[in-house]
Image (cartoon, rainbow, N blue to C red):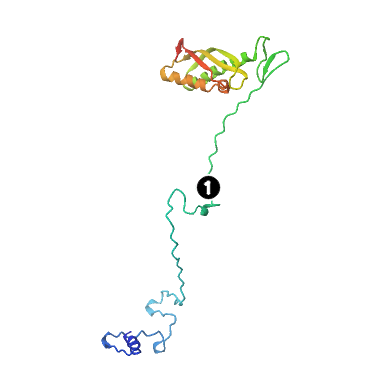
């Protein structure tokens, strides 16, 4: 090591002192004394062991990544480069889709004969006189539907219902479009509910009955309800 340094210094007219005691012996190659590297041998006492073949020297390659160009921080709700996500389904898209609940569909059909008889599928024909108007049938349908809705929600809380009712309607020209239509409708229901319900529970039941009447929901105006339950008015 130092001998090589001394030779380089002498090229520039410099000299260096060599300390023999600090000189390290040269690294001798495997060909010293005429010996060549070959398959290692086992001692007789270790003949049962296995020695791997010598590994040949190969050139190793190392890959490195150059530094990335600096850019302004863009930490936020979206990635730095949204383009990398194009064509790649998001995690939400890869998740199984939960089927949406389908709304129940109810279909009805009714007809009127030339003689004025009202018919409906699966029902006995009704012989209505000429004094029956279509508006009467709409109001009767509102009462019938409201009672049906009341019975449905009462059954869900373990109660039964016996009820009757009346409906009143006013038809005139509407100011909004100049067409004749119902401009005011009221519905009065007199019901017996067993077992009796009171307070907030009864008011909630009646509110659901008004909300879920299909005929009332189909009107362009909201009917005004008046309830009499078990002989007393409910306000």
Q: Residue at x 69, y 14 (%)?
A: 117
Crowd class of label 1 (few under 14; some 14 to 19; many from 20; radius 10 Å): few
Vertical comparison of 167 with 106: above or below:
above
36 sits to left or right of 10 = right
In the rendered image, which quarter is residue 174 located in? top right
| Mark 1, secondary structure of its residue | helix
Number of marks in the rendered image: 1
Of residues 135 and 60, the one drawn nearer to the viewer in this rendering: 135
Of residues 126 and 140, the one drawn nearer to the viewer in this rendering: 140
Vertical comparison of 50 with 13: above or below:
above
Q: Residue at x 64, y 23 (%)?
A: 108
Residue 182, x across and y down, in percent: 59, 17
216 sits to left or right of 231 = right
Of residues 81 and 205, the one drawn nearer to the viewer in this rendering: 81
In the rendered image, which quarter is residue 69 located in? bottom left
The residue to which callout 1 is attached is 94
For the C terminus, the image quarter is top left
> Can residue 140 be seen in the rendering of this structure?
no
Residue 66, x across and y down, in percent: 45, 66
Vertical comparison of 52 with 106: above or below:
below
Residue 37, x across and y down, in percent: 43, 83
Residue 83, x across and y down, in percent: 52, 53
> Can residue 150 be seen in the rendering of this structure?
yes
């Amino acid at each position: 090591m130092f001998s090589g340094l001394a030779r380089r210094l002498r090229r520039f007219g410099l000299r260096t002192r060599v300390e023999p005691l600090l000189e390290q012996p040269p690294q001798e190659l495997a060909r010293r004394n005429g010996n060549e590297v070959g398959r290692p041998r086992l001692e007789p006492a270790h003949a049962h062991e296995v020695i791997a073949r010598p590994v040949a020297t190969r050139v190793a390659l190392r890959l490195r990544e150059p530094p990335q160009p600096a850019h302004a921080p863009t930490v936020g709700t979206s990635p730095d480069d949204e383009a990398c996500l194009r064509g790649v389904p998001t995690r939400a898209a890869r998740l199984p889709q939960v089927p949406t609940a389908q709304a129940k569909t109810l279909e009805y059909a009714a007809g009127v004969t030339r003689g004025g008889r009202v018919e409906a599928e699966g029902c006995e024909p009704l012989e209505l006189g000429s004094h029956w108007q279509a508006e009467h049938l709409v109001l009767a349908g509102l009462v019938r539907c409201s009672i049906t809705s009341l019975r449905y929600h009462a059954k869900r809380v373990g109660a039964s219902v016996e009820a009757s009712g009346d409906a009143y309607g006013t038809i005139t020209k509407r100011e909004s479009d100049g067409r004749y239509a119902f401009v005011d409708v009221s519905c009065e229901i007199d019901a017996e509910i067993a077992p009796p319900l009171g307070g907030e529970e009864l008011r909630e039941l009646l509110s659901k009955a008004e909300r879920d009447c299909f005929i009332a929901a189909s009107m362009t105006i909201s009917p005004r309800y008046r309830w009499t339950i078990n002989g007393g008015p409910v306000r």
